């Protein structure tokens, strides 16, 4: 989509620090990191939100989770001893701000639960 920020990053129209790519996904560092490691994994195809995901997106979703694991391993937080958080924000209450599906990979520091 022409006016979508993350489609722009996928298409290299918008600059970003891309750290991982597959046939179906692109992963780049969050511009306002919430932790020492904060990477966003997005599908190359435009999907607006987890609230609009359907069975037709199954392969993209699986590719995103595998990409997140590979990013975490590459960033040195993939082990059970370290660990990380995977987050899909959906809608206003979650503070979702970019309408292109993205999986947050957050880690590198201890985190509490529940989130704020
Ligand atoms: P969400 O609240 O789940 O919609 O998360 C959107 C995330 O995108 C936020 O953590 C932002 O900091 C991040 N973000 C916004 N613009 C950019 C950008 N141009 N490059 C990288 N990350 C971005």
Image: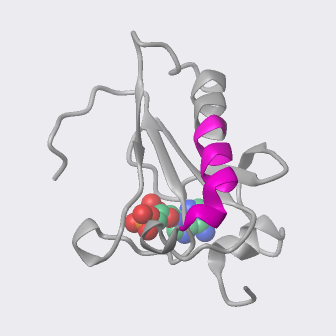
Q: Quadrant of residue 46?
A: bottom right
Q: Is residue 9 above or below residue 82?
A: below
Q: Is residue 69 above or below residue 67?
A: above
Q: Residue 63 in magenta?
A: yes
Left or right, residue 18 beside residue 91: right
Name the chief secondary structure element in magenta. Answer: helix
Q: Residue at x 73, y 85 (%)?
A: 1
Q: Is residue 6 above or below residue 87?
A: below
Residues drawn in magenta: 54-66
The location of residue 24, given as percent across then percent down, is 78, 54
In the image shown, does 35 or 115 lie closer to the viewer?
A: 115
Q: How is the image coloured?
A: one colour
Left or right, residue 31 beside residue 50: right
Q: Residue 98 in magenta?
A: no
Which residue of the protein is positioned furthest toward the front in this rendering?
A: 55
The location of residue 36, given as percent across then percent down, is 46, 35
The location of residue 101, given as percent across then percent down, is 55, 66
Q: Quadrant of residue 72?
A: top right
Left or right, residue 79 beside residue 62: left
Q: Residue at x 49, y 75 (%)?
A: 52
In the image shown, does 37 or 67 lie closer to the viewer?
A: 67
Q: Residue at x 60, y 26 (%)?
A: 75
Q: How many marks?
A: 0
Q: Residue at x 46, y 57 (%)?
A: 32
Which residue of the protein is positioned furthest toward the top in this rendering?
A: 81
The location of residue 55, given as percent across then percent down, is 58, 62
Q: Quadrant of residue 74?
A: top right
Which residue of the protein is positioned furthest toward the bottom in this rendering?
A: 3
In the image shown, does 13 or 60 lie closer to the viewer?
A: 60
């Amino acid at each position: 989509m022409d006016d979508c920020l993350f489609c722009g990053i996928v298409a290299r129209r918008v600059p970003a620090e891309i750290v991982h790519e597959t046939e179906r996904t692109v992963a780049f560092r969050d511009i306002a990191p919430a932790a020492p490691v904060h990477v966003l994994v997005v599908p190359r195809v435009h999907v607006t939100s987890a609230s609009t995901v359907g069975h037709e997106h199954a392969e993209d979703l699986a590719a995103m989770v595998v990409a997140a694991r590979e990013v975490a391993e590459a960033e040195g937080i993939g082990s059970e001893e370290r660990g990380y958080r995977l987050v899909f924000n959906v809608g206003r209450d979650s503070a979702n701000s970019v309408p292109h599906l993205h999986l947050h990979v957050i880690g590198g520091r201890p985190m509490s639960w529940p989130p704020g």
